[in-house]
Every structure is written in structure tokens, then in C-alpha cells.
Image (spheres, grey):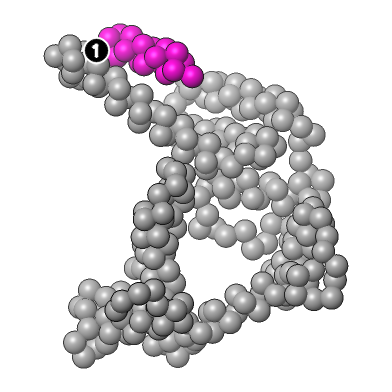
């Protein structure tokens, strides 16, 4: 195929490839063995890889590749649903198109354009109506249980905040954080795994709320911290290697010295 195909032609080609992979007569044995449950982890993984490609910086080739992998997951699930007689890819696309039109009356209807805050309120009102139509009741109904735990904590409490159940400001959340840290410290001597897990969970939950109150994404904050740790520890290993030392042989004190040196070098470059 030469040139740039139309979106319709490219999507049709992908759908044909997916059908061929799942064809009982000559398809891929691995693909034929899969079902929704076995493919779901790959779908989550591909979504994370898209987010990671965006976080790492603008590289159109990488982002294109990751978006293709994610699209393939949607096509995969739609194909299995079609085989089950439920729906096909066309119904998936039509359903999301209908939903987007319904949730944007200021764009597709007669309502005039509104500011972003008003649009957000209208969006949430529409989503609440959709949840009610699905008989999902309660302020916290419909928050996906499969979300990463930090993201879900922020989303749950964002919902609760809409009905007035929230800390007044970030400073109040910090006070709560200190309270939870004290409770965890009190449990340390007993070292009961269930109690420690409960207290650590409370601490993480409050941290997710602190990020929310500061209008930050807790997952992005933690991802940034992970990347920083990887970068700095890699630099520590490199500095030790230059001295002929492996981390396991260097000892904690030497590693801490190198860690502080790496941090200082980063600060000097800012």
C-alpha cells in the first residue's frame, strides 16, 4: 500500500486483519485462545504505554506506534463481542459518537457556547443522568474499580467533594496526613501486617487527596517520582562503578554519599 490511506480504508484493513487472526480456519492459535478476561490486562498495559509515551516527551513515531497498539485492543474486544453476537466495531464507534453529541449540547445542539466551568458541570450532570438510567445510585456510583488505586482515590473523593464532603483546603489535608502518619507510627511496634496495611492505605489515600486539592494528578506525581528515583539511582551506580564498586558491596553509607552528590549535581544544573 502506497501513500496515506483514508481513515476508513486504514480502519477497514485493521478490522480485516483482526478477523483473519481470529478465523478458526487458519487463524493465529494464540489469538484464537484469547477471551475478554485474558486480553483485558494487555488493554490496560497499552493505555499506560500511551500515557508513558506522552510523559516522556514529544516523539511522534513512538506515540503513533503506541496509539496503534491501543486501537488494536479496542478492535480486538469488538471482534470478540461480534463473535459472541453482541455488537461489532461499528456499534462501538456509533455508541461513543452518540454519547459525545449528547454530552456536548453547546457544540452540537442549539445551546450557546459556555465557559469551561459551566461545560464541566453540564458534563457531570449528563453523566449522572446516564448512571441513573443504568440504575447506578449514590454519589460514588460508577467509579471504575479497575482504575489505578491512586487515581480512583482522587476520583472517589472528587465525587464526594461535589456534595460538600471535603477538606476546606490543602493545609487541612496536610494536617490529616500528619495524623495518619502518627497512627502508622503507633502501629509499628506491634507490626501486625493487617493493621499496618490499613494505616499505610489511609496514608496513601490522604496523599491522593492532597494531590487533588493541589489540582495535581497523583498518578503523574508518583510517575515523576519513580522516574527521578530511577535516574538518580542509575547515576549512583555509575559513580560507584567508576570507583570499581558494585552497589551491594559499597554499603549504605557510600551509596547515601553518592546519592547526595547526585542530588547536588542536579541542583547545580538547574
Q: Is residue 268 magenta?
A: yes
Which is more toward the observer, 88 or 58? 58
Q: Can you see residue 55?
A: yes
Q: Can you see residue 48?
A: no
**Residue, x 36% and y 78% (percent of image)?**
14
Q: Which residue is mark 1?
A: 251
Which range is magenta? Answer: 253-270
The percent coordinates of residue 119 (x first, y second) are: 78, 59
How many discs appear? Answer: 1
Decide whether the magenta segment is chiefly helix, strand or loop: helix
Q: Is residue 180 left or right of residue 198?
A: right
Q: Is residue 181 left or right of residue 261?
A: right
The percent coordinates of residue 91 (x first, y second) are: 54, 84
The quarter of the displayed image where residue 191 is located: top left
**Residue, x 52% and y 41% (percent of image)?**
220
**Residue, x 76% and y 32% (percent of image)?**
169
Amino acid at each position: 500500500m502506497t501513500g496515506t490511506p483514508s481513515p476508513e480504508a486504514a480502519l477497514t484493513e485493521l478490522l480485516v486483519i483482526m478477523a483473519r487472526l481470529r478465523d478458526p480456519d487458519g487463524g493465529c492459535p494464540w489469538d484464537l485462545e484469547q477471551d475478554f478476561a485474558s486480553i483485558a490486562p494487555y488493554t490496560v498495559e497499552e493505555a499506560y504505554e500511551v500515557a508513558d509515551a506522552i510523559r516522556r516527551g514529544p516523539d511522534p513515531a513512538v506515540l503513533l506506534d503506541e496509539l496503534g497498539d491501543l486501537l488494536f485492543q479496542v478492535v480486538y474486544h469488538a471482534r470478540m463481542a461480534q463473535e459472541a453476537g453482541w455488537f461489532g466495531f461499528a456499534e462501538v464507534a456509533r455508541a461513543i459518537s452518540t454519547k459525545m453529541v449528547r454530552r456536548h449540547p453547546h457544540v452540537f445542539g442549539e445551546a450557546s457556547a459556555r465557559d469551561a466551568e459551566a461545560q464541566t458541570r453540564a458534563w457531570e450532570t449528563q453523566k449522572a443522568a446516564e448512571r441513573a438510567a443504568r440504575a447506578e445510585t449514590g454519589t460514588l456510583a460508577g467509579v471504575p474499580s479497575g482504575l489505578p488505586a491512586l487515581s480512583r482515590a482522587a476520583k472517589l473523593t472528587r465525587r464526594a467533594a461535589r456534595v460538600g464532603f471535603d477538606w476546606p483546603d490543602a493545609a487541612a489535608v496536610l494536617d490529616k496526613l500528619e495524623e495518619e502518619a502518627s497512627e502508622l507510627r503507633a502501629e509499628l511496634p506491634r507490626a501486625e501486617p493487617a493493621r499496618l496495611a490499613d494505616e499505610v492505605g489511609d496514608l496513601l489515600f490522604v496523599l491522593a487527596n492532597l494531590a487533588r486539592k493541589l489540582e495535581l494528578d497523583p498518578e503523574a506525581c508518583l510517575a515523576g517520582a519513580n522516574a527521578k528515583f530511577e535516574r538518580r539511582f542509575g547515576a549512583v551506580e555509575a559513580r560507584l562503578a567508576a570507583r570499581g564498586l558494585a552497589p551491594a558491596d559499597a554499603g549504605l553509607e557510600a551509596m547515601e554519599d553518592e546519592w547526595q552528590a547526585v542530588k547536588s549535581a542536579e541542583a547545580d544544573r538547574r
